[in-house]
Image (spheres, helix red, strand yellow):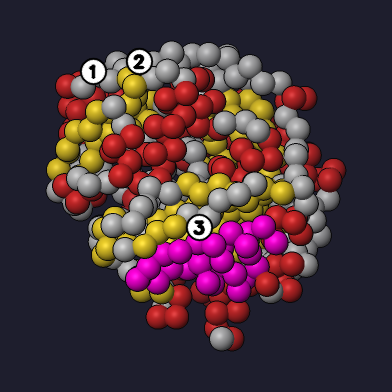
Amino acid sequence: MFERILIANRGEIALRIIRAARELGCETVCVYSEADKDGPWLEAADHAVCIGPGPAKDSYLRIDRIIAAAEVSKADAIHPGYGFLAERADFAEVCRDCEISFIGPSPEAMGLLGDKISAKKLAREVGTPIFPGTEDAVEDVDEAVAVAQEIGFPVIVKAAAGGGGRGMRIVREASELRGAIESASSEALAAFGSGAVYVEKFLEKARHVEVQCLGDSHGNAIHLFDRDCSSQRRHQKLIEEAPAPAVDPVKRLETAEAAARLLREAGYCGAATVEFLMDANGDYSMLEVNTRVQVEHCVTEMITGIDIVQASIRVAAGEPLGIDQSEVKLNGHSIECRINAEDPDRDFMPQAGEVKTFVAPGGLGVRMDSHVRSGYRIPPFYDSMIGKLIVHAPSRDEAITRMRGALSDLRIGPGKSTAPLHSKLLDRSEFRNVEMDIHWVERMLKED
Ligand code: ADP
């Protein structure tokens, strides 16, 4: 096992990793920016090293400073968390060159699965369901038009290196395809340094269902079943739940097994999520692979009892997974609400500044993963998530009731939060009856 893990992240995920490391007997080093010098999670770490000013490009994204901090503090491993450098294969490579273990996949596996075209190619080979579309990056627009005509419009043009919803264009007519390919490609080139784009079928109405997986360096890969994350705004997930409700049990199992197979084939070590869209017939098509721990990993932990962060540290240290697929059992239902410091009544305006009052809910089956406490000042530089409220109960209905209670026990002020919006969403018939699709929250917000 590692002696000392450096955490190249902040906030709730830094705290989550500290807790996991502590139970494994590892010391922790947190790097932090000047804006985070009073971050409550730093108190939980064994050591803390300042790496620069508030803006992430001057601190949390500075590979040189993070590596220097790891060397000075004699850390033998780095956990990237999510966001920041978590999906940068070049960072994983620098760690390897410096003989520091990167807690995550090898740069090769990350590159293979992080590129949407190569991930889709591998998925096609191993039988993970994908959208029909072009097999390679578009080089000849006439060929792309022919493919689009064969699969039928609407189609979507997507960047191989895309992220955060950028570099995508929905195309409804053949005449628009050429322009869409050109503009998506130049946007992708500017944003990601690669202009490679591909074309696939666009699904109008879909649910977002994703499969949590774990792999080790001994050729094992398993799945921990699925989550539904259809409640989104601007591609940001608001509510996640596990297991995904109202899915065909046979297709669920086939898809989850196909996701695990994909990782096994890629030689993947660590935690990963294979994201799918599910159509009205309950058929799945892969969107992309996230090669890191996700914000919503907790709901899967609640229903499987498996500590995903600990497992990812153990496999990075070379241990075998030690969990057989047949040992992964579902127990009850779990829901997570991402609590953001934003005002839903004012176009989700971020609420930086002091949180004077913060009271986390508790009780049976209630978990609050948050780095916030009363008196904490939210810096203006980072995302606005201030905590994840997670519940676990025997059934989905009971989990919804438990979450409603927990949300009403939560106290955050004087700034606004998204907690009242969550209560509203949980009361809607679309959510209660599992009639969500990835646009339902935005439709509801428009109606209001
Ligand atoms: P990113 O890495 O930018 O998040 P994704 O591939 O995950 O890109 O796609 C982002 C979002 O775009 C999806 O959550 C979905 O809402 C939409 N999308 C992407 N591909 C399709 C598709 N083939 N059909 C319908 N919607 C899609």
Q: Earlier in the sequence, mark 3 or mark 1?
A: 1
Residue 191 numbered tag: none
**Residue 218, located in which quarter of the rendered image?**
top right
Position of residue 145 measured from the top left corner of the image (x, y, whole percent): 57, 63
Residue type at numbered disc 1: Lys
The answer to whether the residues at label 1 and label 2 have Cβ atoms under 8 Å apart is yes
Q: Earlier in the sequence, mark 1 or mark 2?
A: 2
Residue under label 1, please give it.
74
Residue sitting at 45 percent across and 16 percent down?
317
Work out which quarter of the rendered image holds the N terminus and state it: top left
Quick one: 199 or 375, which is closer to the camera?
Answer: 375
Residue under label 2, please give it.
3
Majority secondary structure of the magenta segment?
A: helix
User: Vertical placement of 255 versus 322: above or below?
Assistant: below
Work out which quarter of the rendered image holds the C terminus and state it: bottom right
Task: Give the side of residue 19 with respect to residue 151, left or right.
Answer: left
Task: Give the side of residue 296 with respect to residue 400, left or right.
Answer: left
Residue under label 3, please give it.
338
Residue type at numbered disc 3: Arg
Residue sitting at 57 percent across and 31 percent down?
307
Question: What segment carries the magenta color?
Answer: 401-426
Instruction: Say whether residue 221 is visible.
Output: yes
Residue sitting at 45 percent across and 75 percent down?
344
Residue type at numbered disc 2: Glu
